[in-house]
Amino acid sequence: MRRELSIVRRVRSRAIGWMGRRYLARVRRNGIDLSRMRSLPESALMPLRRDGLDPVPALADARVSAPISRLDLPFGANAWLVTGHDEAKAVLGRATGFSSDFTHLVGNAGVTDGDNPGGLGFADPPVHTRLRRLLTPEFTMRRLARLTPRIDEIVTEQLDAMARADGPVDLWEAFALPIPSLTICELLGVPYEERDRFQRLSTARFDLVSGALNSLGAITESLSYLLDIVRAQREAPGDGLLGMLIREHGDEISDRELAGLADGVLTGGLETTASMLALGTLLLLRDPDAFAQIRDDDAAVNRFVEESLRYLTVVQLAFPRFATQDLDIAGVRIEQGDIVLVSLSGANRDPALGTAMEGFDPARPPSPHLAFGHGIHRCIGAELARMELRAAYPALVRRFPELRLAVPPGDLSFREVSIVYGVESLPVLVK
Protein backbone atom coordinates (compact mmCIF):
# COMPACT_ATOMS: atom_id res chain seq x y z
CA MET A 1 0.00 0.00 0.00
CA ARG A 2 2.86 2.40 0.82
CA ARG A 3 4.37 1.89 -2.63
CA GLU A 4 1.03 2.46 -4.33
CA LEU A 5 0.24 5.55 -2.33
CA SER A 6 3.67 7.18 -2.16
CA ILE A 7 3.08 8.88 -5.52
CA VAL A 8 -0.01 10.63 -4.19
CA ARG A 9 1.57 13.52 -2.30
CA ARG A 10 -0.26 16.56 -3.58
CA VAL A 11 -3.51 17.30 -5.27
CA ARG A 12 -4.25 20.84 -6.16
CA SER A 13 -7.72 22.16 -6.77
CA ARG A 14 -8.50 22.86 -10.40
CA ALA A 15 -9.33 26.38 -9.34
CA ILE A 16 -5.61 27.15 -8.98
CA GLY A 17 -4.98 26.48 -12.63
CA TRP A 18 -8.04 28.43 -13.60
CA MET A 19 -7.15 31.43 -11.45
CA GLY A 20 -3.57 31.42 -12.64
CA ARG A 21 -4.41 31.12 -16.33
CA ARG A 22 -7.09 33.82 -16.08
CA TYR A 23 -4.62 36.14 -14.42
CA LEU A 24 -1.87 35.36 -16.91
CA ALA A 25 -4.24 35.81 -19.82
CA ARG A 26 -5.06 39.26 -18.51
CA VAL A 27 -1.42 40.28 -18.29
CA ARG A 28 -0.59 38.86 -21.72
CA ARG A 29 -2.92 41.42 -23.23
CA ASN A 30 -0.62 44.02 -21.65
CA GLY A 31 2.46 42.69 -23.44
CA ILE A 32 3.91 40.47 -20.69
CA ASP A 33 5.78 37.32 -21.75
CA LEU A 34 3.76 34.55 -20.11
CA SER A 35 6.48 31.97 -20.62
CA ARG A 36 8.53 33.86 -18.05
CA MET A 37 5.70 34.11 -15.52
CA ARG A 38 6.04 31.14 -13.17
CA SER A 39 3.56 32.04 -10.46
CA LEU A 40 1.11 34.60 -9.18
CA PRO A 41 2.58 37.55 -7.29
CA GLU A 42 3.00 37.30 -3.53
CA SER A 43 0.13 39.70 -2.90
CA ALA A 44 -2.27 37.18 -4.41
CA LEU A 45 -0.92 34.30 -2.34
CA MET A 46 -1.74 35.70 1.12
CA PRO A 47 -5.21 34.02 1.26
CA LEU A 48 -3.50 30.67 0.62
CA ARG A 49 -0.83 30.94 3.29
CA ARG A 50 -1.18 29.59 6.82
CA ASP A 51 0.58 29.46 10.15
CA GLY A 52 0.12 25.80 11.04
CA LEU A 53 -3.62 25.19 11.00
CA ASP A 54 -4.55 28.87 11.09
CA PRO A 55 -4.77 31.40 8.26
CA VAL A 56 -2.10 34.05 8.46
CA PRO A 57 -3.16 37.06 10.59
CA ALA A 58 -3.25 39.27 7.49
CA LEU A 59 -6.41 37.48 6.37
CA ALA A 60 -8.29 38.45 9.53
CA ASP A 61 -6.85 41.97 9.24
CA ALA A 62 -8.24 42.21 5.72
CA ARG A 63 -11.67 41.09 6.91
CA VAL A 64 -11.73 43.65 9.71
CA SER A 65 -10.56 46.42 7.40
CA ALA A 66 -12.95 45.61 4.55
CA PRO A 67 -14.75 42.28 4.02
CA ILE A 68 -14.52 42.95 0.28
CA SER A 69 -11.17 44.47 -0.64
CA ARG A 70 -9.10 44.98 -3.75
CA LEU A 71 -6.53 42.30 -4.35
CA ASP A 72 -3.37 44.06 -5.41
CA LEU A 73 -2.35 42.47 -8.71
CA PRO A 74 -0.01 44.17 -11.19
CA PHE A 75 -0.47 44.54 -14.95
CA GLY A 76 -4.00 45.88 -14.73
CA ALA A 77 -5.77 42.77 -13.44
CA ASN A 78 -8.76 43.98 -11.41
CA ALA A 79 -9.52 41.49 -8.63
CA TRP A 80 -11.39 41.49 -5.35
CA LEU A 81 -10.91 39.36 -2.23
CA VAL A 82 -13.99 38.52 -0.18
CA THR A 83 -13.29 37.57 3.45
CA GLY A 84 -16.59 38.27 5.25
CA HIS A 85 -19.11 35.48 5.78
CA ASP A 86 -22.23 37.39 4.71
CA GLU A 87 -20.41 38.94 1.76
CA ALA A 88 -19.10 35.51 0.70
CA LYS A 89 -22.63 34.10 0.72
CA ALA A 90 -23.82 37.09 -1.30
CA VAL A 91 -21.24 36.38 -4.02
CA LEU A 92 -21.50 32.59 -4.02
CA GLY A 93 -25.28 32.66 -3.82
CA ARG A 94 -25.73 34.68 -7.01
CA ALA A 95 -26.73 32.50 -9.97
CA THR A 96 -26.56 35.50 -12.33
CA GLY A 97 -24.10 38.36 -12.66
CA PHE A 98 -21.10 36.09 -12.11
CA SER A 99 -19.73 33.37 -14.35
CA SER A 100 -17.55 30.33 -13.71
CA ASP A 101 -17.58 29.15 -17.30
CA PHE A 102 -14.35 27.81 -18.81
CA THR A 103 -14.99 29.67 -22.07
CA HIS A 104 -13.72 32.85 -20.40
CA LEU A 105 -10.25 31.34 -20.76
CA VAL A 106 -10.41 30.02 -24.31
CA GLY A 107 -8.19 31.95 -26.71
CA ASN A 108 -6.05 33.37 -23.91
CA ALA A 109 -2.63 32.17 -22.74
CA GLY A 110 -2.72 29.19 -25.08
CA VAL A 111 -5.96 27.77 -23.66
CA THR A 112 -8.21 25.94 -26.14
CA ASP A 113 -11.63 24.31 -26.01
CA GLY A 114 -9.89 20.96 -25.74
CA ASP A 115 -8.37 21.96 -22.40
CA ASN A 116 -11.79 22.24 -20.74
CA PRO A 117 -11.91 19.64 -17.96
CA GLY A 118 -15.70 19.76 -17.93
CA GLY A 119 -17.68 18.97 -14.82
CA LEU A 120 -19.82 21.26 -12.71
CA GLY A 121 -17.23 23.72 -11.42
CA PHE A 122 -16.47 25.16 -14.85
CA ALA A 123 -20.05 25.44 -16.12
CA ASP A 124 -22.80 28.05 -15.90
CA PRO A 125 -26.55 27.53 -16.27
CA PRO A 126 -28.17 26.10 -18.29
CA VAL A 127 -25.38 23.55 -18.85
CA HIS A 128 -24.60 23.44 -15.14
CA THR A 129 -28.29 23.06 -14.29
CA ARG A 130 -28.72 20.10 -16.63
CA LEU A 131 -25.59 18.27 -15.44
CA ARG A 132 -26.30 18.87 -11.76
CA ARG A 133 -29.87 17.63 -12.22
CA LEU A 134 -28.52 14.36 -13.59
CA LEU A 135 -25.87 13.99 -10.91
CA THR A 136 -27.71 15.13 -7.77
CA PRO A 137 -29.86 11.99 -7.27
CA GLU A 138 -26.69 9.91 -7.06
CA PHE A 139 -25.51 12.04 -4.12
CA THR A 140 -28.64 11.91 -1.99
CA MET A 141 -28.30 10.22 1.38
CA ARG A 142 -30.57 7.41 0.16
CA ARG A 143 -28.28 6.57 -2.77
CA LEU A 144 -25.09 7.15 -0.80
CA ALA A 145 -26.28 4.82 1.96
CA ARG A 146 -25.30 1.88 -0.23
CA LEU A 147 -21.67 2.90 0.29
CA THR A 148 -21.81 2.81 4.10
CA PRO A 149 -20.81 -0.85 4.50
CA ARG A 150 -17.95 -0.47 2.04
CA ILE A 151 -16.68 2.72 3.72
CA ASP A 152 -16.67 0.89 7.05
CA GLU A 153 -14.75 -2.00 5.44
CA ILE A 154 -12.20 0.37 3.91
CA VAL A 155 -11.65 2.10 7.27
CA THR A 156 -11.23 -1.24 9.04
CA GLU A 157 -8.79 -2.50 6.40
CA GLN A 158 -6.60 0.57 6.80
CA LEU A 159 -6.68 0.31 10.60
CA ASP A 160 -5.71 -3.35 10.39
CA ALA A 161 -2.74 -2.46 8.18
CA MET A 162 -1.67 0.26 10.60
CA ALA A 163 -1.87 -2.16 13.54
CA ARG A 164 0.51 -4.57 11.77
CA ALA A 165 3.17 -1.92 11.21
CA ASP A 166 6.32 -1.79 13.31
CA GLY A 167 7.32 1.63 14.47
CA PRO A 168 5.94 4.95 13.19
CA VAL A 169 3.17 5.00 10.61
CA ASP A 170 2.53 7.83 8.15
CA LEU A 171 -1.15 8.39 8.81
CA TRP A 172 -1.41 10.40 5.58
CA GLU A 173 -0.42 7.46 3.41
CA ALA A 174 -1.83 4.66 5.54
CA PHE A 175 -5.20 6.16 6.51
CA ALA A 176 -6.10 9.64 5.25
CA LEU A 177 -5.41 9.09 1.56
CA PRO A 178 -6.62 5.53 0.87
CA ILE A 179 -10.04 6.00 2.48
CA PRO A 180 -11.34 8.63 0.02
CA SER A 181 -9.34 7.10 -2.84
CA LEU A 182 -10.93 3.67 -2.50
CA THR A 183 -14.34 5.21 -1.73
CA ILE A 184 -14.26 7.18 -4.99
CA CYS A 185 -13.24 4.04 -6.89
CA GLU A 186 -16.28 2.35 -5.38
CA LEU A 187 -18.53 5.32 -6.12
CA LEU A 188 -17.52 5.72 -9.77
CA GLY A 189 -17.17 2.04 -10.50
CA VAL A 190 -13.45 2.27 -11.32
CA PRO A 191 -11.78 -1.16 -10.99
CA TYR A 192 -9.54 -1.37 -7.93
CA GLU A 193 -6.69 -2.70 -10.05
CA GLU A 194 -6.76 0.66 -11.88
CA ARG A 195 -6.39 2.76 -8.75
CA ASP A 196 -2.63 3.21 -9.11
CA ARG A 197 -3.11 5.10 -12.37
CA PHE A 198 -6.35 6.60 -11.09
CA GLN A 199 -4.51 8.21 -8.18
CA ARG A 200 -1.53 9.34 -10.24
CA LEU A 201 -3.79 11.33 -12.52
CA SER A 202 -5.11 13.31 -9.59
CA THR A 203 -1.73 14.55 -8.32
CA ALA A 204 0.16 17.85 -8.54
CA ARG A 205 -2.35 19.45 -10.91
CA PHE A 206 -2.49 23.04 -9.86
CA ASP A 207 0.41 23.94 -7.63
CA LEU A 208 1.01 27.69 -7.60
CA VAL A 209 4.59 27.15 -6.51
CA SER A 210 5.42 25.15 -9.65
CA GLY A 211 3.68 27.56 -11.99
CA ALA A 212 0.19 28.18 -13.30
CA LEU A 213 0.53 26.83 -16.84
CA ASN A 214 1.65 23.26 -16.15
CA SER A 215 -1.70 21.57 -15.59
CA LEU A 216 -3.17 21.31 -19.10
CA GLY A 217 -1.29 18.13 -19.97
CA ALA A 218 -2.41 16.44 -16.76
CA ILE A 219 -6.03 17.40 -17.45
CA THR A 220 -5.82 16.04 -20.99
CA GLU A 221 -4.33 12.74 -19.82
CA SER A 222 -6.90 12.39 -17.05
CA LEU A 223 -9.81 13.01 -19.39
CA SER A 224 -8.41 10.58 -21.96
CA TYR A 225 -8.17 7.89 -19.29
CA LEU A 226 -11.63 8.61 -17.93
CA LEU A 227 -13.08 8.56 -21.44
CA ASP A 228 -11.79 5.00 -21.76
CA ILE A 229 -13.54 4.12 -18.50
CA VAL A 230 -16.77 5.76 -19.69
CA ARG A 231 -16.70 3.92 -23.01
CA ALA A 232 -16.21 0.62 -21.23
CA GLN A 233 -19.18 1.48 -19.01
CA ARG A 234 -21.28 2.24 -22.10
CA GLU A 235 -20.64 -1.31 -23.26
CA ALA A 236 -21.34 -2.88 -19.87
CA PRO A 237 -22.72 -0.45 -17.25
CA GLY A 238 -21.62 -1.33 -13.75
CA ASP A 239 -23.17 -0.64 -10.37
CA GLY A 240 -21.24 2.58 -9.75
CA LEU A 241 -22.19 6.17 -10.45
CA LEU A 242 -21.07 6.07 -14.08
CA GLY A 243 -23.05 2.92 -14.76
CA MET A 244 -26.16 4.38 -13.09
CA LEU A 245 -25.94 7.59 -15.12
CA ILE A 246 -25.55 5.61 -18.35
CA ARG A 247 -28.49 3.33 -17.57
CA GLU A 248 -30.81 6.11 -16.44
CA HIS A 249 -29.68 9.06 -18.61
CA GLY A 250 -27.45 7.59 -21.29
CA ASP A 251 -29.18 9.45 -24.11
CA GLU A 252 -29.00 12.80 -22.28
CA ILE A 253 -25.27 12.96 -21.62
CA SER A 254 -22.21 12.56 -23.83
CA ASP A 255 -19.11 10.53 -23.08
CA ARG A 256 -17.12 13.75 -22.76
CA GLU A 257 -19.57 15.17 -20.22
CA LEU A 258 -19.48 11.94 -18.21
CA ALA A 259 -15.69 12.00 -18.19
CA GLY A 260 -15.76 15.61 -17.00
CA LEU A 261 -18.14 14.76 -14.18
CA ALA A 262 -15.94 11.84 -13.16
CA ASP A 263 -12.87 14.10 -13.25
CA GLY A 264 -14.65 16.57 -10.99
CA VAL A 265 -15.52 13.83 -8.50
CA LEU A 266 -11.92 12.62 -8.55
CA THR A 267 -10.20 15.97 -8.09
CA GLY A 268 -12.86 17.43 -5.81
CA GLY A 269 -13.37 14.50 -3.47
CA LEU A 270 -10.00 12.85 -3.04
CA GLU A 271 -7.50 15.37 -1.71
CA THR A 272 -10.08 17.43 0.16
CA THR A 273 -11.30 14.52 2.28
CA ALA A 274 -7.77 13.15 2.70
CA SER A 275 -6.60 16.52 4.01
CA MET A 276 -9.57 16.69 6.39
CA LEU A 277 -8.80 13.22 7.75
CA ALA A 278 -5.14 14.07 8.36
CA LEU A 279 -5.63 17.55 9.79
CA GLY A 280 -8.68 16.47 11.80
CA THR A 281 -6.55 13.75 13.38
CA LEU A 282 -3.97 16.39 14.23
CA LEU A 283 -6.72 18.37 15.99
CA LEU A 284 -7.63 15.27 18.00
CA LEU A 285 -4.02 14.68 18.99
CA ARG A 286 -3.62 18.20 20.32
CA ASP A 287 -7.02 18.20 22.11
CA PRO A 288 -7.32 15.25 24.53
CA ASP A 289 -10.87 16.24 25.49
CA ALA A 290 -12.04 16.05 21.87
CA PHE A 291 -10.20 12.73 21.49
CA ALA A 292 -12.06 11.30 24.49
CA GLN A 293 -15.40 12.73 23.43
CA ILE A 294 -15.54 11.15 19.98
CA ARG A 295 -14.11 7.91 21.37
CA ASP A 296 -16.84 7.58 24.00
CA ASP A 297 -19.81 9.63 22.78
CA ASP A 298 -21.44 9.03 19.40
CA ALA A 299 -23.32 12.32 19.71
CA ALA A 300 -20.03 14.22 19.86
CA VAL A 301 -18.86 12.94 16.48
CA ASN A 302 -21.09 15.17 14.37
CA ARG A 303 -20.18 18.28 16.38
CA PHE A 304 -16.50 17.50 15.95
CA VAL A 305 -16.86 16.92 12.21
CA GLU A 306 -18.75 20.16 11.61
CA GLU A 307 -16.44 22.25 13.78
CA SER A 308 -13.34 20.77 12.17
CA LEU A 309 -14.79 21.43 8.70
CA ARG A 310 -15.30 25.08 9.69
CA TYR A 311 -12.04 25.56 11.54
CA LEU A 312 -9.79 23.79 9.04
CA THR A 313 -11.56 24.83 5.81
CA VAL A 314 -9.08 22.85 3.73
CA VAL A 315 -10.49 24.30 0.47
CA GLN A 316 -9.28 27.82 1.08
CA LEU A 317 -10.69 29.62 -1.98
CA ALA A 318 -13.88 29.05 -3.92
CA PHE A 319 -13.82 28.81 -7.71
CA PRO A 320 -13.10 32.29 -9.09
CA ARG A 321 -16.14 34.27 -10.20
CA PHE A 322 -15.96 36.57 -13.21
CA ALA A 323 -18.39 39.48 -13.18
CA THR A 324 -20.54 39.49 -16.31
CA GLN A 325 -22.13 42.83 -15.46
CA ASP A 326 -21.65 45.72 -13.07
CA LEU A 327 -22.76 44.64 -9.61
CA ASP A 328 -23.16 46.04 -6.11
CA ILE A 329 -22.18 43.57 -3.37
CA ALA A 330 -22.51 44.85 0.21
CA GLY A 331 -21.99 48.40 -1.00
CA VAL A 332 -18.93 47.59 -3.11
CA ARG A 333 -19.05 48.25 -6.84
CA ILE A 334 -17.85 45.25 -8.87
CA GLU A 335 -17.39 46.05 -12.54
CA GLN A 336 -17.97 43.76 -15.49
CA GLY A 337 -14.86 41.66 -16.14
CA ASP A 338 -13.57 41.85 -12.57
CA ILE A 339 -12.30 38.66 -10.90
CA VAL A 340 -13.83 37.93 -7.49
CA LEU A 341 -12.06 35.49 -5.17
CA VAL A 342 -13.93 34.26 -2.08
CA SER A 343 -11.79 33.23 0.87
CA LEU A 344 -13.69 30.37 2.47
CA SER A 345 -11.14 30.15 5.27
CA GLY A 346 -11.58 33.84 5.97
CA ALA A 347 -15.37 33.69 5.90
CA ASN A 348 -15.45 30.70 8.24
CA ARG A 349 -13.48 32.61 10.90
CA ASP A 350 -15.79 35.65 10.72
CA PRO A 351 -17.08 36.70 14.18
CA ALA A 352 -20.49 37.10 12.54
CA LEU A 353 -20.78 33.30 12.88
CA GLY A 354 -20.37 33.36 16.66
CA THR A 355 -17.89 33.97 19.44
CA ALA A 356 -14.22 32.99 19.36
CA MET A 357 -14.39 31.77 15.77
CA GLU A 358 -10.60 31.96 15.41
CA GLY A 359 -10.40 29.08 17.88
CA PHE A 360 -11.41 25.42 17.73
CA ASP A 361 -14.23 24.32 20.03
CA PRO A 362 -15.34 20.68 19.64
CA ALA A 363 -18.43 21.40 21.75
CA ARG A 364 -19.59 24.21 19.47
CA PRO A 365 -23.02 23.56 17.90
CA PRO A 366 -22.79 23.22 14.11
CA SER A 367 -22.56 26.61 12.43
CA PRO A 368 -23.60 27.64 8.89
CA HIS A 369 -20.02 27.36 7.65
CA LEU A 370 -18.97 27.56 4.01
CA ALA A 371 -16.47 24.69 3.97
CA PHE A 372 -18.36 23.15 1.04
CA GLY A 373 -19.11 26.46 -0.63
CA HIS A 374 -22.55 27.90 -1.19
CA GLY A 375 -25.09 28.38 -3.96
CA ILE A 376 -25.22 26.51 -7.24
CA HIS A 377 -21.56 25.50 -7.02
CA ARG A 378 -21.76 24.10 -3.50
CA CYS A 379 -19.86 20.81 -3.38
CA ILE A 380 -22.19 18.08 -4.56
CA GLY A 381 -20.20 15.48 -2.64
CA ALA A 382 -20.55 17.19 0.75
CA GLU A 383 -22.62 14.40 2.30
CA LEU A 384 -20.25 11.71 1.04
CA ALA A 385 -17.34 13.54 2.68
CA ARG A 386 -19.27 13.78 5.93
CA MET A 387 -19.99 10.05 5.79
CA GLU A 388 -16.29 9.27 5.45
CA LEU A 389 -15.28 11.64 8.26
CA ARG A 390 -17.98 10.38 10.63
CA ALA A 391 -16.90 6.79 10.03
CA ALA A 392 -13.13 7.31 10.13
CA TYR A 393 -12.46 9.58 13.12
CA PRO A 394 -14.19 7.52 15.85
CA ALA A 395 -12.94 4.23 14.39
CA LEU A 396 -9.37 5.56 14.52
CA VAL A 397 -9.39 6.72 18.14
CA ARG A 398 -11.28 3.64 19.36
CA ARG A 399 -8.84 1.30 17.65
CA PHE A 400 -5.75 3.20 18.83
CA PRO A 401 -6.46 4.86 22.20
CA GLU A 402 -2.71 5.52 22.61
CA LEU A 403 -2.39 7.24 19.22
CA ARG A 404 0.23 10.00 19.32
CA LEU A 405 2.59 11.94 17.10
CA ALA A 406 5.90 10.26 16.34
CA VAL A 407 7.67 13.60 15.82
CA PRO A 408 7.54 16.97 17.60
CA PRO A 409 4.65 19.10 16.27
CA GLY A 410 7.13 21.68 15.06
CA ASP A 411 8.69 19.13 12.71
CA LEU A 412 5.50 18.65 10.69
CA SER A 413 5.62 20.03 7.17
CA PHE A 414 2.55 21.77 5.77
CA ARG A 415 1.88 22.81 2.20
CA GLU A 416 3.26 26.22 1.51
CA VAL A 417 0.75 27.54 -1.02
CA SER A 418 -2.26 25.51 -2.05
CA ILE A 419 -5.96 25.88 -2.64
CA VAL A 420 -6.38 22.57 -0.79
CA TYR A 421 -4.43 22.96 2.44
CA GLY A 422 -2.83 19.96 4.08
CA VAL A 423 0.12 18.33 5.76
CA GLU A 424 2.81 16.58 3.72
CA SER A 425 3.00 13.62 6.09
CA LEU A 426 1.74 12.75 9.57
CA PRO A 427 4.02 10.27 11.38
CA VAL A 428 2.22 8.65 14.32
CA LEU A 429 2.70 5.84 16.82
CA VAL A 430 -0.27 3.54 17.33
CA LYS A 431 1.05 1.31 20.13
Image (spheres, grey):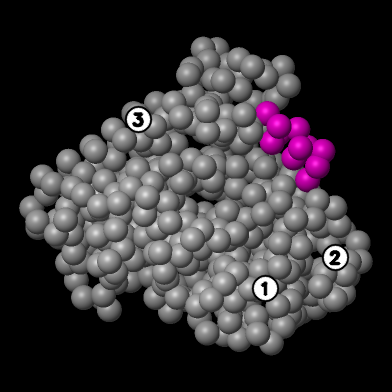
Q: Nearer the viewer, residue 319 or 26?
A: 319
For disc 2, the neighbor class at 10 Å (few under 14, some 14 to 19, many from 20) is some
Image position of 60 with respect to 222: above or below: below
Report which residue position mark 1 lands on.
Answer: 84
For disc 3, the marked residue is: 150
Which is nearer the N-term, disc 2 or disc 3?
3
Q: Residue at x 47, y 53 (%)?
A: 272
In the visual, does 183 lie left or right of 219? Answer: left
Instruction: Please name the residue that numbered disc 2 is placed on.
Output: 337
Q: Horizontal and vertical percent for residue 262?
A: 56, 35
Q: Left or right: where does residue 185 sit relative to residue 83?
A: left
Label whose residue precedes the other's in the sequence (1 or 3): 1
Q: Quadrant of residue 318?
A: bottom right
Image-quadrant location for residue 425: bottom left
- Residue type, numbered disc 1: Gly
| Residue contact at pointers 2 and 3, CB within 8 angstroms | no
Instruction: State how far apart marks 1 and 3 are (Cα).
Output: 39 Å
Q: Is residue 132 magenta?
A: yes
- Kindly report the secondary structure that dominates the magenta region of the rendered protein: helix
Residue 102 makes an appearance in the image: no
Pointer 3 local density, CA inside 10 Å: few below 14, some 14–19, many at least 20: some
Toward the right, the furthest residue is 326
The residue segment tinted magenta is: 124-134
Q: CA distance from mark 2 to mark 3?
A: 46 Å
Q: CA distance from mark 2 to mark 1?
A: 22 Å
What is the crowding at mark 1: few (fewer than 14 residues within 10 Å), some, or many (at least 20)?
many
Q: Residue at x 22, y 62 (%)?
A: 427
- Res. 182 visible in picture: yes
The disc at residue 285 is: none
